Image: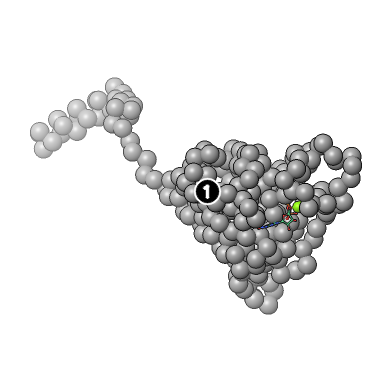
Amino acid sequence: MAFESDNKPRPVSAKVVISGGFGVGKTTFVSAVSEIAPLRTEAKMTSAAAGVDDNQLVQTKTSTTVAMDFGKITVDEGLVLYVFGTPGQDRFGFMWNDITAGALGALVLVDTRRLDECFNAIDFFESRDVPFIIGLNQFDGAPQHDPEDIREALDLDPSVPIIRTDARTSDLALDTLVQLLSHILESLSAAASKEAAPVHHVPDDREAPVVTDGMRTAAMSALAAERTG
Ligand SMILES: Nc1nc2c(ncn2[C@@H]2O[C@H](COP(=O)(O)OP(=O)(O)O)[C@@H](O)[C@H]2O)c(=O)[nH]1
Ligand SMILES: [Mg+2]
């Protein structure tokens, strides 16, 4: 842990990412959990975006996050979490690497009416070995699928937690973040024990010891000395 000059421990800070497709509730989620007024970079959707941004099921949405959402949560005196939301639209995908750099893990929000919206996010975190959990956001009229059916539809590894959440409710959203943190810890300790696993030497793989003439002569004279001694 880092220390300031007065020896008071400074909290460790960690970064997590809230991700998912367009209109799945990322901006809402960051607002619900952040203790500071979240930095938002919403812009009114213009007619220029018509046809580019798929908003058929998100009729009420008139603004969109052009860069990112940003919030802060003090978990306790030892840990401060910084929460970054990714821009939902494909045309801002070039920012994802910067926004997710150094993140410990991610929450991928899912609207069960539009499952395909989250494929890009899942591929992104899977391919970079970033631990993530799936948050099923409770949209009105959205089908209540069994989480295991969702796992199958999204082709998710059994180790990826799938939980129900509500981006509009601080308690539920914070609880979701706690679940993300515990999944991150589990993933980190699984990776650490993999690294610490003992390396088994296969005897057949060992190189035969090289015996030089000098060694042979030294051994013979040691034997001879013993016999005569
Ligand atoms: N019913 C319902 N609406 C939600 C929920 N989360 C977000 N919304 C609404 O869905 C719309 C899109 O949310 P937004 O946070 O802007 O999505 P983003 O594009 O992922 O940032 C907004 O009108 C929100 O009020 C939720 O859990 N339930
Ligand atoms: Mg947004």
Left or right of 149 in this view: 60: right
> Residue 67, position in %: x, y?
80, 49
Q: Is residue 179 above or below residue 65?
A: below
The colouring scheme, among rainbow, by chain, secondary structure or one colour, is one colour
- In the displayed orientation, state which residue is furthest to the right: 47
Res 2 seen here: no
> Along the horizontal axis of the image, is 166 left or right of 163?
right
- Which quarter shows the C terminus? top left
Q: Which amino acid does label 1 sit on?
A: His
Quarter of the picture containing the N terminus is bottom right
Q: Which of 189 and 118 is in front in this view?
A: 118
Of 89 and 136, the residue lying toward us: 136
Residue in view at x 36 percent, y 44 percent: 198
Beta carbon of the mark 1 residue lies under 8 A of ligand 1 = no
* In the displayed structure image, the side of residue 53 where residue 195 appears, left or right: left
Q: Residue drawn at (68%, 77%), measured in percent from left and top? A: 6
Q: Is residue 212 above or below residue 143?
A: above
Q: Residue at x 25, y 29 (%)?
A: 218
Name the image quarter holding residue 212. Answer: top left
Q: Residue 207: x, y in percent?
A: 33, 27
Local crowd at mark 1 within 10 Å, few (<14), some, or many (≥20)? few
Residue 114's x, y, as percent?
65, 43
Q: Which residue is drawn at 83% across and 52% down?
A: 63
Place residue 53 in its image quadrant: top right
Q: What element carries label 1?
A: loop
Q: Total number of numbered labels?
A: 1
- Whether residue 217 is visible, yes or no, is yes
Q: Name the residue under label 1.
A: 145
- Location of residue 33 with respect to 198 vertically, above or below: below
Indicate left or right for 200 with 127 as reference.
left
Give the image quarter of residue 76. bottom right
Work out which residue is located at the far front of the displayed protein and give it: 141
